[in-house]
Amino acid sequence: MIYQHLIRQNSQWERLVGAFHNGRLAHAHIFHGPPGSGKQAHAIELAALVNCHNPGDDGACQVCPSCAKFHTLQHPNLEIVVPLPRRVAITKDDPALKALKPSDLAQLVEELALKAADPYHRIQVDGAQSILINSVRDIRRGIRLTPAEAGWRSFLIFEAEKLCAPNPTAANALLKILEEPPPRTLFVLVTDRVQLMLDTIRSRCLGLHFPPLPPEQVAQYLTEQAGVGQQEAGILAQVTGGNLPQAQLLSGEDDALSQGVEQLLAALLTPRPKGWQTLVDRLVRQHNLHPVSQMIVGKSFRGQRRLQKGNVGNADLGVPGSHQNRTRVQTCREICKSDRIGGRRQVQPVCRRHQRKIVLIDGQVGLCLCNGGAAPTGKEER
Ligand SMILES: [Zn+2]
């Protein structure tokens, strides 16, 4: 394995390695599943395996010249395709990277280095909304060339659903390549949202689902790799539903925020709704809707009960894209504590007291956006 600290998804990985050793590895795969389940890293591991000079039952050998290049993601047979911004007008014959400004290019290089070091790092270039058609044209040109080294030419397309946005031009161009790939060519399309992929693409790829990581493994990773205390690691693993990068992100926040998270979670785990509401008020006021607020805004008493039962997923936390993350207009009765505004079914687009917009939260707590989401001041309380 290339990544020493990757939490291996055993059944998926054994299936891939077995298919490779039996000569039955599909030429195109879609790795799909929730964020933070290690799909991208497993795609890199697969590309390393098919290029390794001494592939074993566990995967790539780690030590051969090919594996050495995979450790830095610099192997000539490896192409990682990610969404990119289009900063500069380019022609259809230009390479995709020509659409970037030098600062974007520098960021991309840095992101790839981070990915080489951390299997759970998500490569992001500012302003990238879609996979450029020129990136697919680059693949088409590259696929015709003889591989620089023995092995499989491997194309890993991350956030592959963005082949289809804002229009399916890039996806359709890829389709033609997937129909008749040359021998010893590997495509792995990686996506959190397989439902957004074109059926025509999906039908040409072997789908492999990567489930969320078990919380206990996430907690162990946080403890051993990020130096997070056991108790905090356990809570973060549970709360993020096995989303390791999100748990890492929360554990990396400053001490005050970490303490706030711990206090919040402790409150959530006790049957004292008012206690945790007070905490929510304070955290939102202090941290102005940063990652913690993602948890807060999606959290409800229903979610609290599920948390107490150990059954909490991203949707409960308001993670972007989850079904419970939709903003609803609500009264801000809990925050404003105004009897006049209160009302179970009342739908009020603005807070009557503050005349400002109100946002969510799942029918339980509303945040008035006055003062950046802070609770009203004493004067307003009257
Ligand atoms: Zn090797």
Image: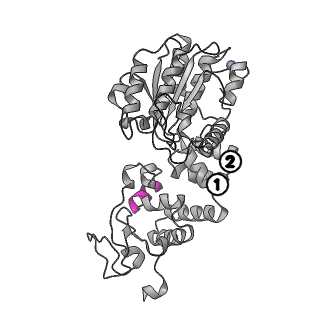
Q: Which residues are magenta?
A: 301-308
Kind of residue at badge 1: Gly
Image quadrant where residue 305 sits: bottom left
Q: Give the position of the N terminus as an image quadrant.
A: top right
Task: Identify the residue at horizontal 55%, vertical 22% (top origin).
Answer: 154
Residue at x-position 41% and y-position 23%: 205
Q: Residues within 10 Å of mark 2 (few under 14, many from 20)?
A: some
Depth order, front residue of 234/187: 187
Rendered view: 315 above or below 169? below
Q: Is residue 86 visible?
A: yes
Residue 308 image offset from top left, x and y in percent: 47, 56
Q: Pointer 1: residues within 10 angstroms few (<14), some, or many (20+)? A: few
Residue 74 point in image, percent of width and height: 66, 28
**363 in relation to 162, above or below:** below
Q: Is residue 64 magenta?
A: no
Q: Amino acid at mark 2?
A: Ala
Q: Quadrant of the C terminus?
A: bottom left
Q: Is residue 100 left or right of residue 65?
A: left
Identify the element where label 1 is drawn: loop
Q: Would you say residue 304 sits in the magenta stretch?
A: yes
Looking at the image, tell me whether mark 1 or mark 2 is earlier in sequence order. Answer: 2
Q: Nearer the viewer, residue 177 or 359?
A: 177
The residue identified by callout 2 is 226
**Mark number, residue 74:** none
Mark 2, secondary structure of its residue: helix
Viewer-nearest of discs 1 and 2: 1
Asked whether residue 38 appears in the rendered view, the answer is no
Q: Which residue is mark 1?
A: 252
State yes or no: discs 1 and 2 in contact (Cβ < 8 Å): yes
Q: How is the image coloured?
A: one colour
**Above or below, comparing residue 366 to residue 174 in the picture:** below
